[in-house]
Image (cartoon, helix red, strand yellow):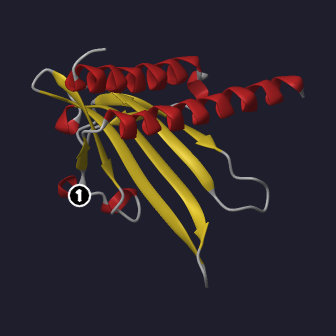
Amino acid sequence: MGEPDEILQATCQEIVTLVATAIDAESSGELRVMRLPGGAEVGRQMTIDATESGGRMNRCHLSILNADTAPAEEVVRIEYEHDKQGKFEQRRVYSVQSVRRRGGKLVLLENFIAENPETVREEDFRSITSDSYARTAVKSVQDWTRYRTWQLQQTRKR
């Protein structure tokens, strides 16, 4: 087994590969082109919607980005949005995981502080340094992409 940093690098690369593969498999009509404020294309995004009819909202947005042009040298962005039932009310929960290139290496960061995409602040991201915790990000991406594969199979059956 490799050094902890090498293992975390491999985990980050696995996340990048999973997201890139999922986006490459999606039909282009389902993808959103992501652009910088000046209009230059910086990446592609897909949305996986697991909201059941009449149920709570449950969505995942997977983005693959060009680290050479994306802000903060971001390679992958994974955004989760879902409704969570609290004791007295339902509320929307939003979180972001991000793989970025820093000093020639990949790093995994997360942000659970933002309430929605518009309130994401760079200073709220924290680095994930535990590979066992980073593996939960891999599992989550695997679960969401498997769900999307299942969705597409169901659509083809109709």
Determine which quarter of the picture holds residue 153: top right
Mark 1, secondary structure of its residue: helix
Measuring from the top left, give residue 147's x and y in whole percent: 67, 34
Neighbours of disc 1 within 10 Å: few (<14), some (14-19), many (20+) = few
Residue 92, visible in the rendered structure? yes
Q: How many marks?
A: 1
Q: Residue furthest front?
A: 1
Q: Residue furthest bottom?
A: 88
Determine which quarter of the picture holds residue 86: bottom right
Query: Is 77 left, or right, of 40 in this rendering?
Result: right
Q: Residue furthest right?
A: 158
Determine which quarter of the picture holds residue 151: top right
The residue shown at (36%, 58%) is 112
Query: Is 23 left, or right, of 156 in this rendering?
Result: left
The residue shown at (52%, 34%) is 139
Pointer 1: what residue? 124
* Tag 1: amino acid: Asp
User: In the image shown, does 9 or 58 lie closer to the viewer?
Assistant: 9
Measuring from the top left, give residue 113's x and y in whole percent: 33, 63
Relative to 69, say whether 51 is above or below. below
The residue shown at (20%, 52%) is 122
Query: Is 152 left, or right, of 66 in this rendering?
Result: right
Measuring from the top left, give residue 56's x and y in whole percent: 68, 62
